[in-house]
């Protein structure tokens, strides 16, 4: 693993997701904002940038050391979001973040899981079929549904400037939820779908 390349790539990944998040926040129309948010993941996928939710779904097919790369990617993503958040402080981000913190932890976890599931579908379909179709279906779907994307949430937090213990706990819960969601289909494929029938 090239540490410098991983960190720089992940910072750029955080910047791309921040751009999508900012466009979504500033859009007057919810559906349009949800669709435009896709530009973030489009940039990540097209230029193979580091993104936590784009990588963690492949943890089961990699050695344990892969998790060190995941930690570096989260760090880089946060730096990218911090840079963008400090550069673009938005009143809309304050309102959005206050609403997020009002949700209970279990709801936040499940929102993170559902987001991770949809993001994995979008990323995996591009990886396997080189198609962006799932991207422009799954990403607007999780925005419209109000699911939580940990890296986008990092941008909202940094733009709102509401750094606190509650905010840290929120982000950690979403990171966990996204990780679980991104691993649901890979775990199904690895341990259930391909499991040999008894007696064979």
Image: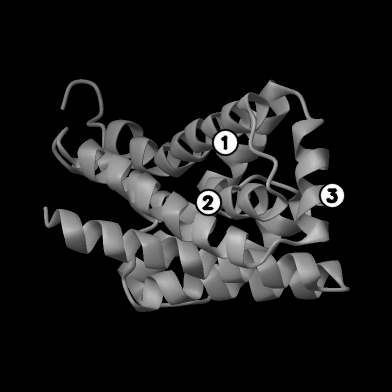
34 sits left or right of 16 in the view:
right
- What is the CA distance from the residue labelled 2 to the residue labelled 3? 18 Å
Query: Where residue 195 sits in the image (x, y, percent)?
Result: 26, 32
Give me the disc on residue 151. Answer: 2
Instruction: Choose between 1 and 161: the one closer to the eye.
Output: 161
Give me the disc on residue 181. Answer: none
Query: Where residue 60 sits in the image (x, y, percent)?
Result: 25, 38
Picture quarter with the C terminus: top left
At x 66%, y 52%, the residue is 156
Q: In this view, does 78 lie above or below 37?
A: above
Q: Is residue 105 above or below residue 29?
A: above
What is the crowding at mark 1: few (fewer than 14 residues within 10 Å), some, or many (at least 20)? many
What is the crowding at mark 3: few (fewer than 14 residues within 10 Å), some, or many (at least 20)? few
Q: Is residue 184 above or below residue 34?
A: above
Q: Mark 1 points at which residue?
A: 171
Q: Name the residue under label 3.
A: 95
At mark 2, the secondary structure is helix
73 sits left or right of 125 in the view:
left
Determine which quarter of the picture holds residue 84. Answer: bottom right
Instruction: Choose between 2 and 142: the one closer to the eye.
Output: 2
At x 79%, y 71%, the residue is 26
| Outermost residue, right side | 28
What is the crowding at mark 2: few (fewer than 14 residues within 10 Å), some, or many (at least 20)? many
């Amino acid at each position: 693993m090239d540490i410098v390349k991983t960190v720089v790539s992940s910072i750029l990944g955080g910047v791309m997701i921040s751009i999508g998040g900012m466009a979504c926040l500033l859009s007057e129309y919810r559906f349009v904002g949800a669709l435009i948010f896709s530009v973030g993941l489009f940039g990540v996928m097209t230029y193979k940038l580091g993104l936590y939710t784009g990588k963690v779904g492949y943890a089961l097919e990699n050695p344990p050391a892969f998790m060190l790369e995941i930690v570096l990617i989260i760090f880089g993503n946060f730096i990218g979001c911090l840079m963008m958040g400090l550069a673009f402080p938005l009143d809309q981000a304050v309102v959005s973040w206050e609403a997020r913190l009002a949700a209970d932890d279990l709801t936040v976890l499940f929102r993170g899981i559902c987001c991770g599931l949809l993001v994995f579908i979008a990323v995996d379909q591009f990886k396997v079929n080189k198609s962006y179709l799932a991207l422009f279906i799954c990403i607007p779907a999780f925005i419209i549904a109000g699911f939580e994307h940990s890296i986008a949430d990092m941008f909202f937090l940094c733009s709102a400037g509401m750094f606190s213990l509650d905010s840290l706990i929120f982000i950690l819960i979403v990171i966990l939820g996204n990780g679980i969601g991104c691993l649901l289909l890979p775990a199904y494929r690895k341990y259930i779908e391909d499991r040999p029938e008894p007696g064979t």
